[in-house]
Amino acid sequence: LAAWDGPLRHAEGPNAMSLDGEWKFVLVGHPDQAPQGFEGLAYDDAGWGTLRVPSNWECRGHGRPVYTNFEYPFLVNPPFVPDENPTGCYRRTFAVDEALVGGSHGPRRLFLSFKGVASAFSVWLNGQHVGYSEDSCVPAEFEVTDLVAPGPGNVLCLKVLRWCSGSYLEDQDHWSLTGVYRSVVLVSKSACHMWDYAVSTDLAWGEQDQELVGATLGVEVKLEKGADEAWGDYGVEAALYRGKRLVLSSFVGGDALQREESWVHRNATSGQDVRGSRAVVRVDVGREAGELPLLWSDEEPHLYHLVLSLKRAGETVDCETCQVGFREVKLEDGRLLLNRRPLLVRGVNRHEHCPKDGKAVSLESMVRDIELMKRHNFNAVRNAHYPTDPRWYELCSRYGILVCDEANIETHGFDPLLQNNHVNPANSPQWMPAFLERGTRMVQCNRNHPCVIMWSLGNESGFGAAHLAMAGALRAMDPSRVLHYEGGGSRTAATDLVCPMYARVHQIVEFISDPSEHRPVVLAEYAHSMGNSTGNIHEYWEAFRSHDRLQGGFLWEWVDQGLEREVDPAQPGRVGWGYGGDFGPGPHDAQFCINGLVFPDRTPHPALLECAAAQAPVRFSVLEKDGHLIEVANHHLFLSLEGFDLLWEYVVDGQVALQGRLEDVRANPGATTLAHHPLHGQALRDVCPLGVEAFLRLRCELREATPWAPAGHVVAQQEFAVPVQRPSSSVGSPSSQAGELRVTELEDGSLEVASFCGGAPGEGPSWRGAYVRFDRTTGCPVALGRSAHDEVTLGAMRVSMYRAPTDNDKGGIAGRSFMSRWKESGLDCLAQRGAARLEVVRRDAAEVELEAEWEMVPQFHKQAVVQGGVGVGCVGGAHWFASATSGELYAQEQEDLVTTVKARYVVREGGDLECALQVDASRAMLRLSGGCDLKQSLARVGLSFEVDEARASHVAWYGAGGHECYPDRKTSGLVGCYTSGLGGLHVPYIYPSENGARADVRWVALSPDDGAGSALMVEAAGGAACFEAVAVSRFTSRQLEAATHQEQLEPSGKAHVSLDHRHMGVGGDDSWSPSVWDQYLVGPGVYEFGARMTLVDCPGGAAGSVDACTSLWRRRRME
């Protein structure tokens, strides 16, 4: 990586001048309202404000940002745009150094380069009109040689339009923002100069072993000079460096220059004819350098530095430079190959986004994105949905990120339902030149970046002749890369890959089973990560690893596109992240832009950890049948395991008991090897004795630091249960207090079971020990205590079957979403019908058993039932392979909606309470019709209650993962003991919803902040080894559901606890249909589960509660 340490800022050096900085600026409502004569030298702009370049003016307080998914923000009447067309007028005065205008070789030629301006603009320099450009996302360059004056006083003026005819081709799913959002540079070139060049690396391979045997560096340089100049002694030198070491050099000049006198054009500003020539350099690297080059890949991004020098009589008059990576991209036998190895694309879609500056993204933000991607096992990015900042490509080449570069074309709003393809501009001859220009300009700009391995013809623009023309042009221009295009069903002649969006696993397996289809599958988009989402991603990766032609895909998407906004004008400085509709009236698609793996400030979502685990390039498995062997599969294409440390840990009852290193484990790229279990026989029994729960945890770490991660960074980790024999007989469970249990009915009607330690019960409260109090009306426990000063109140205990809907829960048309069906069935408004039956059925000195029974029925309110949709209504899911739903939703005849709960409580001396519940939810939801292809699911089945926040400041648990996990998103959750402050359990999704659950929890403990007082420990009981999900939150479900922004949430003063025997998955195949897989649904039925509650001494706060609870849990496992 040290081979390329040159500047990335493209405006540095003696022959370039940055024009970034503060510009004078005024915004008007229409192009015709621009101040008259503002482009003139004498115009007085003293009354104007200022605007920083680069920036989007909406993010600087001028106008408002607009977000839509596919709806055009204006009336569709191509090619016309609305009369209300905000227009930004820019002025910048600057001085030009004499050396830029002319040097020792005579006058020089000057070019203005605009790296990115949205959406169209006109340019004036020193009062003269220079030109006009459209296409917001590729550089626009103008020659201004005859317009620039040396010294101060040069005035550059721009008129930037929000909408133009090109806006019809820029209907991408992101913020519509305007202005000069990338850098502006004045470039100086010699009169005779290199105006374009293309680099190729042709590799030769051995027929038998497919190892590299030869490499040729090819460079085609196009030269330009005035028509009246002679070529004379001009020539081109190509020098290749590895770091500071010259690897090879080659010179082409004199008669070897291929004169192309047909390349004649008229300079727009000078009126002079300009003629061209061509220099072609082809160098056998092995012969000239004496060694074969190191190859570039995402795993080993070996870079060289090419310096092209235009020389005249041996003296350099012009220079260009770029990165070079020797690599080959090829399709062969139905597979996509990189350097002759079958590629697995661990990709993600990335929009350019900054929460403060919109589309103006800093270099530091780009580096942060790449570091996070690499650390979480991503190796590829799709530039969604346009070419990006030029620095991004250099960073990707430097760090090792494969790039799918995408033309700035999307016309989704013409045919969002995929029913009228003929109306797409791609089918109109009038639009074909614009399509071609956008595709070819992308290739011309970015073809020399080794990171780019595929070109995309755009996004969601239907399919037509324009795409076939683009495909032909791009294949001719650059046969070294493959083409990608999803439109038209992802299997057209315009694409080299089958690249569908949101196809299910069974569908992509069907694609490669089709005998007429021989192309590989690389998903353009999959796993829609909107809010609390990205469930079952591991299922995709099991398929990718199992089928050669399923070669990965690009997850949607990298970053939540939230923009900073002032939450309350009365509280300056209090900001939050806004989405569609937060910045004013007009069309918008709400939070549909909030679907990233990281928050806008790049704080990771929990789902990012799941991605890292699912697509880890090293995998472990335990082969118990083969003598306790461990299989280590190295899925790297080019890296052996020599650069990694393989570590093991035995985790016993949630805590690390012993750890070490797997020695002498070697595996070549793509190979599998075997290692022995670290411990055997008596040594294993000593670490994992009778009755404990034990796991063998295996981990792969970087041995040395890389540019993207420190040494010790975890690349992969998995765990495997260690079989440990359970005790054959009970050894009993000692009580913390000895005494007699007595049942008392209190004045408020509640029932108390208390332990008395001696004397007469009427002689004072000091005789009462631990106790449990029950509410006769609800049939539920309401308090556990040891004394009047050490009591935990259990408020609002109930059986829960609803959750604050996630974005995915809302996906589905015409009432088909999970949320709509929950509400139609009244799961969100269940209430107890009448008083519960509560009675004591058994008592003795050591135990008291009670039984309770009650019914829950919906208490419907007069309110409209939300019919689903997440900002995009019914058309968010119009993709080629979306599963259609049809038929009547509900059966005509329905039974009464009712849920019956039967509870059995056992109170033991010492205040220990065990609850066993039977929840008959078989009639909790409306029955679906026989013709409906959906399946019903409850959100959860579990026990919920609340305690005072002061009694739950710290939370400890023994379960799968220290981070948020759900039943279909827990591959990354390693079983262990974890602690957190109460607030730390909350995941602040921008659009609030159900969040913060931990999966497979054996026990959870709530303890007070200062450690004074007992911790409330709750264990899974009733035959279940664990709760499928446990959540502890400062907010109620109603608060989470009612809020539309995170900053609207105010802590309730309580800790709200959900102990879920079953919890529905979060889904994530998409967010506009019910996409939770069947195995993660919680169908209406009868569920039996239990919980055991105990007050535990916890000296030392949360850490002490872990030790105390682990000890107690271990003793009880021996019972």
Image (cartoon, helix red, strand yellow):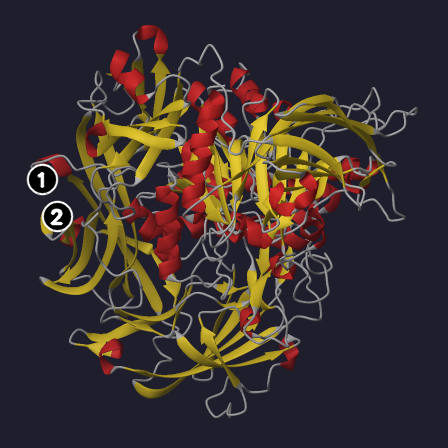
Check disc 2: other Cα within 10 Å, few if <14, some if 14-19, many if 20+: some
Horizontal and vertical percent position of residue 934: 74, 26
Taking the spot 41% from the left edge, 31% from the top edge, the residue there is: 654
- As helix, strand or loop, the secondary structure at mark 2 comes to strand
The residue to which callout 2 is attached is: 250
Q: Is residue 954 left or right of residue 5?
A: right
Q: Considering depth in this image, is 44 or 699 the residue closer to the camera?
A: 699
Q: Is residue 484 left or right of residue 312?
A: right
The residue to which callout 1 is attached is: 288
* Residue 993 visible, this orientation: no
Taking the spot 69% from the left edge, 57% from the top edge, the residue there is: 588
Q: Considering depth in this image, is 704 or 588 the residue closer to the camera?
A: 704
Check disc 1: other Cα within 10 Å, few if <14, some if 14-19, many if 20+: some
Q: Is residue 1057 left or right of residue 858?
A: left
Taking the spot 67% from the left edge, 23% from the top edge, the residue there is: 844
Which amino acid, mark 1?
Answer: Glu
Horizontal and vertical percent position of residue 714: 32, 38
Residues marked 2 and 1 touching at CB (< 8 Å):
yes
